Amino acid sequence: MKYTIGKIELINFKVFKGEKAFELGPGLTLIHGPIGVGKSSLIQSIEYALYGEQLEVKEKIARLSDLINEDSDYAKVGISFLNGNNELNIERSLVRQKDSARQEIIINGNKGDESELSKLIGLSDDDFERFILITHRTLEQLAYGSTQRRTVIIDRLFDIDYLDSILRLLPIDAVSKAIDERKKAIAGAVEARELRQRYGSLEAAKRRAAELREEVERSKAELEKLSAAYGGMLKRRSAIMGKIKDVEAQYRQYIMLSEKLKELQSRETASKRSELDVAGEAEVLRAMLMSRLEENLMEAEAQALAKASSMDELLTAMYDSIKRLEERTREVGDDLRQYKDQSEKSREELEKLRMSVSLMDERIKALEPSVERYMAAEREAGGLPAAKAELERLKSRYEEAEAEASYKSALSVVINHIKASGGDRCPICGSKLETGALDRIRIDIDEREVGELRNRIDKLERLVNEAELLHPIYLQYVELEKRARGARERLEEEISKMERLEKAIRDLERKYVDLSNFLPVVRERMERLEEAYEEVERAKRIEKIRSELTGLEQLLRDHDVNVEEAVRLESELGEVNNRLESIRNRLEVLGSEYMQLETKLSKVESMGIDVEKTLKEVEELEGILSRFVRVRDGLLKVQREARQRIIEGLAGEFNSMFKKIYPYGDLGGVAIELEQRERGDYAYALYAIRRGRKVPMSRLSDGQRLTIAISFVLAMYKLIDHKFGFILMDEPLPYVDENVKKALAALLVNISREGITNQVIIATQDSTLMSVISEEVKNTGISMKIIELGK
Amino acid sequence: MQAMSTKLDEIIIDLLRRELGNDADLVIALYDAYKARGSRGVKDELKDLLSKYGIEV
């Protein structure tokens, strides 16, 4: 069972002045009356009693004190909720305190508090407003709103409209615009950065631009001046050339040789060695190289060096020899390293061998006393095999001698017994003894022989035992001796090898050091020799040119040519030409830098903003924009997922509810789906099912749309776990025609008949709606109560 | 479906964290602001972030 509202008692609540009491019944309760008589206040009093607030107060449209009638400072709302035999009585009183109000709560006659009440009713205020209080806005937007508006209201009903609000409020466009504006403003920022990097600062760049401008101007002026001078010189040359038509070739040769002479003279050095000195030094070096080549068995190189006749050939052969000797030095170095490695390994091997021999010697020395004892025993025994044979023989003899001695001893005892007893018979065999027989028996026992045999046997046994005991040691000794001999021989060989190796190393080291010291010295002397040779050759050429020039000069003078002036003019022309070329090149470089610098500076100056700060802002804003875009994409995904879950939770009950309350058979059910919109997000789409096909809301009649809207809110009302058996409708459909009102009346009857809720409370000023509801209820057995409020 | 919105909120917060990683903190701050002060709260949060760039929200 769930709570229905039995009675509402008001004192000075909103428009109700004084005490008022309203009895509500099960089924339908219509609160009817014109505007301003308190229909909405009566509905609002229910929410206020339950939660101590109501929508207008929460939305700050009104203050709590506004709930008290304006002619009073005190208000009270009392409501009896019925649940079978149980009753829940809630009273709230308000006392005005300036602009605010103090309130008190009484639960079932006792002072209570919000938490106690919250436990009793088990539904939050927000959920009450969404699921119990059905507003016309909800119904209208569900029934007649666009997909977007319907989506907004459904999201709001499920309290996920904040996702859409955050999405709409994300200022992605504003941030993009701000970035674009800044980027436009700092179009010259790259140039500014480059200028700073290159010149240190914008001020320094400006100074450089001024310097460049001055230098360009200077260079241009100089270029102009030199160009004019050059033109004059060319005219003068032209005049000279006119005079020397017949000797023009000679004139040109003279000028060319003069230039060449000047160049050769400019390369002259201080060193003045004669050709003879050079040849002598060359022979000395040839001899030095020959000896090294021969020492190193480089016959081909030695022969080539010996054969070289001209200085050029000799220099080439000597450089080749040096190159080969340098290669040889590297080879010797490589061999040396290899031999040293080998030597190191041999030394380690030698040490190991030495250690092994030493250990064997120690072992042999330790075995020597035992071996000596073995040798002595064997020597004393006369050789081990012979000693063993003699021992066998002695043992055999000893056994015989001992048996004989035993027999004689026994016989002696018997004879002595017979003599002592005086008997005439043998005490052993009983035969009669002849008289005097005993006297004839002589018994000689040789005990000395037995003793000697025993001693010899003992001695020989000791010797044989000792020899046998020491024999393995002896064998080990012999084997060890053999191995030690082998090891010593190998040691000798290794020592010999080591000595050979060390000798080879010493030889190689000597050769390496010799070549390493020799070659740089020879190379340096070679280079000096070559310079001296070139100098000699240059002097020869200068001499030759001078001689030619003298002849040519004479020829030109004979043709009335001022040779000095001509040469000077040619020289000046060359110099001016070079200078002009240099200035033009410099102007090109300076002009290019100046133009670029000016362009960049003008861009930077036109910005009029703090470039660094703006660049930083752009970077930060791009980060923010990128974050907002990620947030938007993520929110859209999450919103879709949340909406999908809502649909999954609601679709079954929505369809079931529709089937219960829709009175006709032309529609088989309803569905709700997510539909992708043009902007990429997903919205709720409500459909009716007609003959198995989906029909969108826009193609349904007003009554069908209304049924779908009410089915939707009732599905939510049913699915949510709460303790209220009533729904509240405050002016549910204010602006609809009579047909729709009739449809609503039919739906309300069906809702009551199907037991979807126990109590429907509707506040309306619409008399037609009241009439059609009254008409629809007739003969249904559903009880209906009308509370008529008047002015 | 009791406290559907509360459950949805929990699911949504989890989804946001999964989808947005570190950026979820911003959305959750906006969510808290919305719950406390509605759209005005969200605007104020964004304003705090953007006012220094002169961007109106």
Image (cartoon, coloured by chain):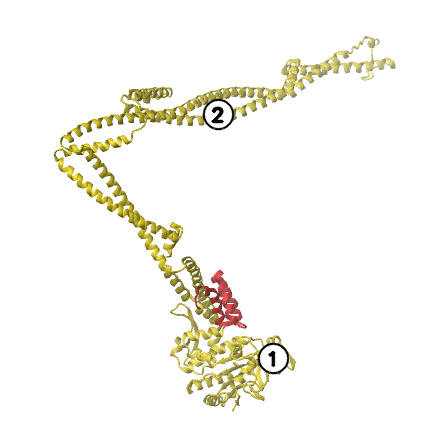
Chain colours: A yellow, B red
Q: Amino acid at mark 2?
A: Ser
Q: Name the one closer to the observer, B23 or A406.
A: B23
> What chain does mark 1 sit on?
A
- Left-right relation of A527 to A401: left
Q: Does residue A754 appear in the picture of this structure?
A: no
Q: Amino acid at mark 1?
A: Arg
Q: Label for residue A245?
A: none
Which quadrant would residue A48 be assigned to in this image? Answer: bottom right
The relative height of residue A432 versus residue A754 in the rendered view (above or below) is above
Query: What is the residue that sits farthest to the left in this orientation?
Result: A246
User: Residue A170, position in %: x, y?
Assistant: 44, 67
Residue bearing the label numbered 2:
A343
Secondary structure category for the residue under label 2: helix
Which residue is pictured at 47% across the width and 27% down the height? Answer: A341
Which residue is pictured at 25% across the width and 32% down the height? Answer: A262
- Left-right relation of A203 to A311: right
Q: Residues within 10 Å of mark 2 (few under 14, many from 20)?
A: some
User: Residue A311, position in %: x, y?
Assistant: 28, 23
> What chain does mark 2 sit on?
A
Q: Residues within 10 Å of mark 1 (few under 14, many from 20)?
A: few
User: Residue A99, position in %: x, y?
Assistant: 57, 80
Q: Name the one closer to the observer, A126 or A791.
A: A791
Q: Does residue A390 appear in the picture of this structure?
A: yes
User: Residue A707, position in %: x, y?
Assistant: 45, 81
Secondary structure category for the residue under label 1: strand
Residue bearing the label numbered 1:
A102
